[in-house]
Image (cartoon, coloured by chain):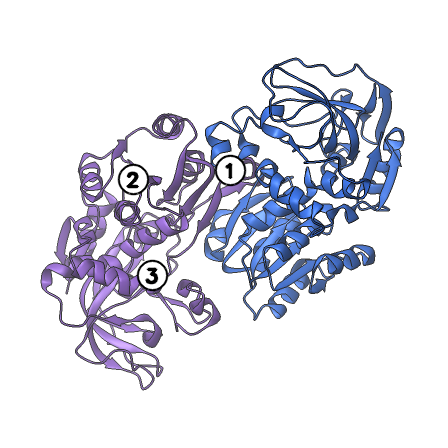
Chain colours: A purple, B blue
């Protein structure tokens, strides 16, 4: 089969690779129906994370089950399945607490930009749809496997409640899905921070009530203007840079909450500053598995349409162009079809 | 009148000072019935915070109202009152949200180790008891004005719930009060980290079910042993050092919460480490005012007895000995009587 391999920053190739095989009884192999490029894939692509040797890429996927190990009884060959970028056995204490992305047997997916994918912990990771979904739902179901699940977790971690005010820092695919999540969880006012017109439009379509294009101190001041001078109840930090974290912490009111889902790069939080802010802070890789049944249902009933974050669709073999388009911000997110 | 003044690290004197006066219509002046030395008073006493010029000390108090400003209608002269180390108007947006210690008009108390004290924002800070309380209740009511209120907030910020497991880092007065709070909020298992026998005993009397005397990695391993390998639901960080924060963050399970109430000194939190821990973090000066009616009631009905943290009682004029005894860990906390 063929799949994407990164050889060095800026150098992603579509290559012949070994077919994946069942190696443990809890594995499954799926035929990829759709996969995509993630904002976090750009960290190594841009040289912000090392690329020591050629490595396969991709952690978002929907597909058709080809084969299952002997202990996989939740899905069967031929079914359409959605998974998570973090696999989980769904039985360990952390899974039972609802924190599947801290599963004691967790393995992060990393080979999904390919025609076939081995899914470890398939028994606790994959969720099948009742029927083969119409093609129109595929982008949104794919989004659920990471960006929509992550945006959802950002809103949950930021404790968005009905009637509350939420700020979303970051207008990438996760931030835009965070707007959807804040709306679904009942936020009355949703302030999206974005400087890009196409993303502003999508944020509004997804439920944003206000757009702030300023950043830094000016952006913080604008948030305060819109929130009675004290800041927002909930802030979703969907970037992972020190600037974004600062923006988030200073945009929340005393007693408010920041949910941070951008993998932090060079972020350090000053203890005394956090102390006097009275802001609650929780982050991490989203426990997507916990949300899958609910989010799949919201997609298939037409309630949410996070697939709109894919503004570029390419054949999988053109994966390198997907990276380039996202790196150059020509695309929010590139969907890849084998 | 007379009161305590710190002149330099290690140099606390009991001196003649100006009598406090009503300077704003929202002020009150109280005659101190009891005050005390706080663990945080030891930061400047030990030279860990600068002492640029002689300054009065103390922020914990109960007393009898002597005089009130024209806008103070909640209390009247002659009443026994309890307050908070952070004053609040109790009407600003942060107060209405329950975060009185982030009141937009907040002033921190700092002159309470004295015979008389001016209370700014008295209208939104002081709570009177129905009657003059018996003397036996005075230590516990005094504790409510800071250490018990702070321990309570630590447990609330750590989201202690009925049936949960809580770890308390720090065996000072706040940590010990945190044990009381965790018990009152229904924690089933309360693990106190303490190396001092007298404090261990008090922790057990207050409701601790387990004592851990190890620190650092060994202490973390012991917590994991007691919590099914994953860590505790809630951790109360009641110290403020980098070691204590590390201990706290590593003692909480994924999805658990750390409430931190020790004023952080040189504490920096690594963003990526916090991210992958899945631990929620909230700290700050406790909104004691929000808890006063409830905590006063728990004291006067005999449900809690946080006054036991005072293991040394001195005449106010011997305040310097109170500092010495706490600095040398001969006393957990020194109560001072004018």
* N-term mark: 2 or 3: 2
Q: Which mark is residue A311?
A: none
- The residue mark sitting in front, 3 or 1, is 1
Q: How many numbered marks have been drawn onto this rendered protein structure?
A: 3
Estimate the spatial distance between the alpha carbons at disc 2 and disc 3, rounded to whole Å: 25 Å
Residue at the far bottom: name it: A70
Q: What SS does tag 2 mark?
A: loop
Asked whether the residues under the numbered discs 2 and 3 touch, taking CB atoms below 8 Å apart as contact, a structural biologist would say: no
**Residue B184 drawn above or below residue A82:** above
Percent of width and height locating residue A80: 18, 72
Q: Is residue A114 visible?
A: no
Residue at image point 39% right, 73% down = A89
Q: Which mark is residue B98?
A: 1
Given residues A284 and A162, the one toward you in this image is A162
Estimate the spatial distance between the alpha carbons at disc 1 and disc 2, rounded to whole Å: 21 Å
Q: Which mark is residue A188?
A: 2
Quadrant for the C terminus of chain B, please: top right
Given residues B332 and A55, the one toward you in this image is B332
Q: What SS does tag 1 mark?
A: loop
A88 left or right of B108 in image: left
Percent of width and height locating residue B182: 62, 55
Q: Residues within 10 Å of mark 2 (few under 14, many from 20)?
A: some
Instruction: Give the residue pinned by disc 3.
Output: A288
| Chain to which mark 1 belongs | B
Estimate the spatial distance between the alpha carbons at disc 3 and disc 1, rounded to whole Å: 32 Å
Discs 1, 2: same chain? no
| Chain to which mark 3 belongs | A
Residue at image point 10% right, 63% down = A135
């Amino acid at each position: 089969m063929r799949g994407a391999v990164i050889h060095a920053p800026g150098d992603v190739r579509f290559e012949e690779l070994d077919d994946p095989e069942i190696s443990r009884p809890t594995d499954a192999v799926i035929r990829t129906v759709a996969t995509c490029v993630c904002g976090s894939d750009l960290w190594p692509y841009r040289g912000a994370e090392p690329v020591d040797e050629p490595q396969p890429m991709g952690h978002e996927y929907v597909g058709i089950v080809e084969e299952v190990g002997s202990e996989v009884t939740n899905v069967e060959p031929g079914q359409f399945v959605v998974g998570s970028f973090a696999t989980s056995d769904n039985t360990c204490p952390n899974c039972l607490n609802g924190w599947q992305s801290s599963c004691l047997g967790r393995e992060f997916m990393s080979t999904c930009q390919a025609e076939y994918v081995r899914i470890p912990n398939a028994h606790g990771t994959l969720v099948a749809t009742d029927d083969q979904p119409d093609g129109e739902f595929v982008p949104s179901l794919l989004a659920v496997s990471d960006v929509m699940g992550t945006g959802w977790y950002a809103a949950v971690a930021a404790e968005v409640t009905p009637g509350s005010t939420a700020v979303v820092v970051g207008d990438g695919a996760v931030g835009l899905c965070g707007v959807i999540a804040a709306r679904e969880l009942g936020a009355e006012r949703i302030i999206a921070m974005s400087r890009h017109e196409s993303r502003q439009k999508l944020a509004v379509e997804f439920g944003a009530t206000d757009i702030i294009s300023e950043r830094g101190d000016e952006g913080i001041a604008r948030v305060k203007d819109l929130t009675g001078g004290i800041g927002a109840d909930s802030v979703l930090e969907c970037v992972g840079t020190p600037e974004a974290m600062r923006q988030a912490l200073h945009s929340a009111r005393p007693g408010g909450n920041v949910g941070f889902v951008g993998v932090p790069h060079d972020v350090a939080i000053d203890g005394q500053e956090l102390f006097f802010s009275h802001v609650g802070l929780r982050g991490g890789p989203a426990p997507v598995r916990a949300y899958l049944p609910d989010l799949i249902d919201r997609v298939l009933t037409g309630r949410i349409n996070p697939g709109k974050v894919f503004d570029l669709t390419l054949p999988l073999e053109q994966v390198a162009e997907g990276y380039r388009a996202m790196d150059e911000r020509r695309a929010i997110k590139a969907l890849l079809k084998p």
